[in-house]
Image (cartoon, rainbow, N blue to C red):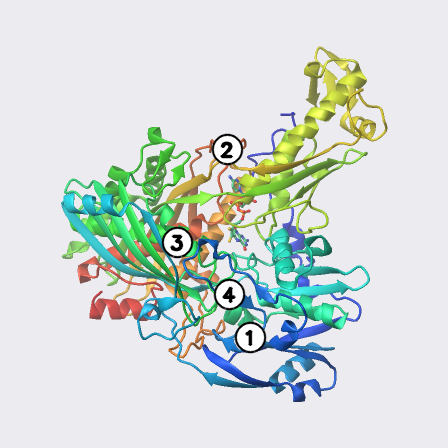
């Protein structure tokens, strides 16, 4: 590594360089963009959760002034375009077709796009869409993934018995059954992991521009994965990838759903090609609620077997996961993979997990911040608390007794996860110390002379909840290009996409150290398939690992070449060259020096060593060796009012370990954001459908996301256990908060409600739910 003139940048608490533009409102989002001659697309969406489409009368809409086109599936079908968002069926038991971008005679969820209206003006398009008359024949709907498997449940796709697209079996059923037989005790819980809706500040949007001279398509869109979307648009529209450019400008948050391919962007592109003009589509908030991919929606029964001394022997779980009315990409396979994290931090010798991925008449479900890891950790952490209560043991001690010790890494779990490194007990101890655990427990024991010290003078009950967790992070390849320009300036290109994660700051920190150039001389470019050779994108807390190591490797190669060029110019051997203060110097002869800018200029002006090619840049396709498992322990302290059901989160402590930290300030910010989202899931949020498949929580008036005054101050700490899977030693952090917070909060509330005999409660813990549970029992 070269020595940076400003000292090491990695590990510094730098402010995010992208923020001034964002907070002063000068960033450009997709809907800010206009193209000459542009028209607007608005959808006619299904009013029903399940129906056949008997007839679509578009005549009034077509006759509206300013309307340029009204399209239905018939038009797509006759346009020699696949017109369907593919499903990856390789993992599945039953074939299901993809999601048609306009309904092909049947609708399977409320809000599914049925017809598309393009007009010169957004308001005209909206009025004309209202004038499209769709004749539906309603069918029975089913929205609950367990009810959907009943013999008499409505059939959503032909050839998919009981609506089960696939069953996944993970772990060893026999070994687990044996462990359960041998164990002293077994506890069982039933729980629901509530269905969530992504609430990025910016709804999804696309501006599609088809060039019929070049026969090429440019789609500017809200994407977390520009290259991924390019491939999916190619599949859906039948246009080769080299004729499609996807640009993702500033994107106002993603949380997973902007990584998935939905009909909106594809229809905008199809209309642009059809009409030969640019077409813009921007979802309203309610459209995003109706038809943007939702998250979670698991119903689980799980058991934990353990001995009287607190040793866990086995875990088994059965989960019904709702998929919605269609699969999108790998979404039907996703629920089955959640079992991979069920061991959490524990030495759990036997695990068996069965998952049924079930079609329902609801919006498609796909990955939402955490994507499978929150579902798994919620099961295990709820079980662990339940077991500790059964043994009348302190839940922290029960966890400690079963944690995998640091010397047992790498560690392969009973469900085949290969944990790379960990020091779980230290994180637990940090959390207990930060929250003042012993003192809180002492208060609960003997406070106020009450029968149970949980009750305070104000009538509220004190609860303490813990969640220990692991998070698989990284995966897949990423591209990173480092280009030094002739004047010594540097541009870094990466295939990831930052929409709140601060990659511009992070990658510049990494490259500054590897290359030995000032941080401010380094620009970072993401989000354009024509400028970046390839990419996987940003999801799964993978960018620091995959993108960070890609740009680090490229920077290292460029640094080596720069050193060779400098050595040639200084007539010394490369190993005798040191890089200091922005100069290359001969060791022992400090007056023999050449500036970084001179080396850069030489690289482009034939003043090169004999075997060296011109230019000063490198491209890396970095492929991580194994998965990096981040971990941590979160602790919540709550006060619950049994008269109103109100919960106050008094303290929230997050201890996280994401290996080496590139920028601790951003790490902390990511934890804050994730915890806020976890609080949303635990206490407020739930997508609700009625029996007919109508989304009842179709706007922010009905779907409660927490407001800032509902987010308590958070205390964050961290431990650092480097990952051996990658040269930077990093693990991801982007989703940790959403994984740990729901179990920490629910365990805290259950702890508070122990005097009422409450053993179980389902999220979201609204005041009504808490009040009813106290009165009606769990
Ligand atoms: N970081 C670090 N050192 C590490 C790990 C991370 O300094 N060892 C810092 C880096 O500054 C990096 C940031 O944390 O830029 C996030 O890194 P990483 O964990 O690699 O996650 P990604 O960049 O891949 O982001 C994805 C993750 C996911 S999956 C979701 S969903 C999510 C999230 O990040 N959506 C977000 N955070 C979000 N934050 C915002 N503001 N908006 C979203 O939509």
Of marks 2 and 1, the one in the foreground: 1
Q: How crowded is mark 4: few (under 14 residues within 10 Å), some or many (20 or more)?
A: some
Q: Which mark is residue 104?
A: 1
Where residue 96 appears, x then y in whole percent?
47, 64
Location of residue 510 by image quarter: top right
Q: Mark 2 points at which residue?
A: 729
**Could you tell me which secondary element the residue under label 4 belongs to?**
loop
**Could you tell me which secondary element the residue under label 2 belongs to?**
loop
Name the residue: 37% across, 46% down.
341
Location of residue 143 by image quarter: bottom left
In space, the residues marked 3 and 2 are separated at their CA atoms by 29 Å
Q: Name the residue under label 3.
A: 336
Taking depth in this image into account, of 421 and 533 the one nearest to the observer is 533
Residue contact at pointers 3 and 4, CB within 8 angstroms: no
545 vs 231, left or right, is: left
**Could you tell me which secondary element the residue under label 1 belongs to?**
loop
Q: Mark 4 points at which residue?
A: 97
The vertical placement of 513 against 693, above or below, is above
**Could you tell me which secondary element the residue under label 3 belongs to?**
helix
Ranked by sequence position, the earlier of labels 1 and 4 is: 4
Ranked by sequence position, the earlier of labels 4 and 2 is: 4
Question: Mark 3 CB in 8 Å range of ligand 1?
Answer: no
Q: Looking at this rendering, what residue extends furthest in the front direction?
A: 159
Residue contact at pointers 2 and 1, CB within 8 angstroms: no
Name the residue: 22% across, 59% down.
759
């Amino acid at each position: 590594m070269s020595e940076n003139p400003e000292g090491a940048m990695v590990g510094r608490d730098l402010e995010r360089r992208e923020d001034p533009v964002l907070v002063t409102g000068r960033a450009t989002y997709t809907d800010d963009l206009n193209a000459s001659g542009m028209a607007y697309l608005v959808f006619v969406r299904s009013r029903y959760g399940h129906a056949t489409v008997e007839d679509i009368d578009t005549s009034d809409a077509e006759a509206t002034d300013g309307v340029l086109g009204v399209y239905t599936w018939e038009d797509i079908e006759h346009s020699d375009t696949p017109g369907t968002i593919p499903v990856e069926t390789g993992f599945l038991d039953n074939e299901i077709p993809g999601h048609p971008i306009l309904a092909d005679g049947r609708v399977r969820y409320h809000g599914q796009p049925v017809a598309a209206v393009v007009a010169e003006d957004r308001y005209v398009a909206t009025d004309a869409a209202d004038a499209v008359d769709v004749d539906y024949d309603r069918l029975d709907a089913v929205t609950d993934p367990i009810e959907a498997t009943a013999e008499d449940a409505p059939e959503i796709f032909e050839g998919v018995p009981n609506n089960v697209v696939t069953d996944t079996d993970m772990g060893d059923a026999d070994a687990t059954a044996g462990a359960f037989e041998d164990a002293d005790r077994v506890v069982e819980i039933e729980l629901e992991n509530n269905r969530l809706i992504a609430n990025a500040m910016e709804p999804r949007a696309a501006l599609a521009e088809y060039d019929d001279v070049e026969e090429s398509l440019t789609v500017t869109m809200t994407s977390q994965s520009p290259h991924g979307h390019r491939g999916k648009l190619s599949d859906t529209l039948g246009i080769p990838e080299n004729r499609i450019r996807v640009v993702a400008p500033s994107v106002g948050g993603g949380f997973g759903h902007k990584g998935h391919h939905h009909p909106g962007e594809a229809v905008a592109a199809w209309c642009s090609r059809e009409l030969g003009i640019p077409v813009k589509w921007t979802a309203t908030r309610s459209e995003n609620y109706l038809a943007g991919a939702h998250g979670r929606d698991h119903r689980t029964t799980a058991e934990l077997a353990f001995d009287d001394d607190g040793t866990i022997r086995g875990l088994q779980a059965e989960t019904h996961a709702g998929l919605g009315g269609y699969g999108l990409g790998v979404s039907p396979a996703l629920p089955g993979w959640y079992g991979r994290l069920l061991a959490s931090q524990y030495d759990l010798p036997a695990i068996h997990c069965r998952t049924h991925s079930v079609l329902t008449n609801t919006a498609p479900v796909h990955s939402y911040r955490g994507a499978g890891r929150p579902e798994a950790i919620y099961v295990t952490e709820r079980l662990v608390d339940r077991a500790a209560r059964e043994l009348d043991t302190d839940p922290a001690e029960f966890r400690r007794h079963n944690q995998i010790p640091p010397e047992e890494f790498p560690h392969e779990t009973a469900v085949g996860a290969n944990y790379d490194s960990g020091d779980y007990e230290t994180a637990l101890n940090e959390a207990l110390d930060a929250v003042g655990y012993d003192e809180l427990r002492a208060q609960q024991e003997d406070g106020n002379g009450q029968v149970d010290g949980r009750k305070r003078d104000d009538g509220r009950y004190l609860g303490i909840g813990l969640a220990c967790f692991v998070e698989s992070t990284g995966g897949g390849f990423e591209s990173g290009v480092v280009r030094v320009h002739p004047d010594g300036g540097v541009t870094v290109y990466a295939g990831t996409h930052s929409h709140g994660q601060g990659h511009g700051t992070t990658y510049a920190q990494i490259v500054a150290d590897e290359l030995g150039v000032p941080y401010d001389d380094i620009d970072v470019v993401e989000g354009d398939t024509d400028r970046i050779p390839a990419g996987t994108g940003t999801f799964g807390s993978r960018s620091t690992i995959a993108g960070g190591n890609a740009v680090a490797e490229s920077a290292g190669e460029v640094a080596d070449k720069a050193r060779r060029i400098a050595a040639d110019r200084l007539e010394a051997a490369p190993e005798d060259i040191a890089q200091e203060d922005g100069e290359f110097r001969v060791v022992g002869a400090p007056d023999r020096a050449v500036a970084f800018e001179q080396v850069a200029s030489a690289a482009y002006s034939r003043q090169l060593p004999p075997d060296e090619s011109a230019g000063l840049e490198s491209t890396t396709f970095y492929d991580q060796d194994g998965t990096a498992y981040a971990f941590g322990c979160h602790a919540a302290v709550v006060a619950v009012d049994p008269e109103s059901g109100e919960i106050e989160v008094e303290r929230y402590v997050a201890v996280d370990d994401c290996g080496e930290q590139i920028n601790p300030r951003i790490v902390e910010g990511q934890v804050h954001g994730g915890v806020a989202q976890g609080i949303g899931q635990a206490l407020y949020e739930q997508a609700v459908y009625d029996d007919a498949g109508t989304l009842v929580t179709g706007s922010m008036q009905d779907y409660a996301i927490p407001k800032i005054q509902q987010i308590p101050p958070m205390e964050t700490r961290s431990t650092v256990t480097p990952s051996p899977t990658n040269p930077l030693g990093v693990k991801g952090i982007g989703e940790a908060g959403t994984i740990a917070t729901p179990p920490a909060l629910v365990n805290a509330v259950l702890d508070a409600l122990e005097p009422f005999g409450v053993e179980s409660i389902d999220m979201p813990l609204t005041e009504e739910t808490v009040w009813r549970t106290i009165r009606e029992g769990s």
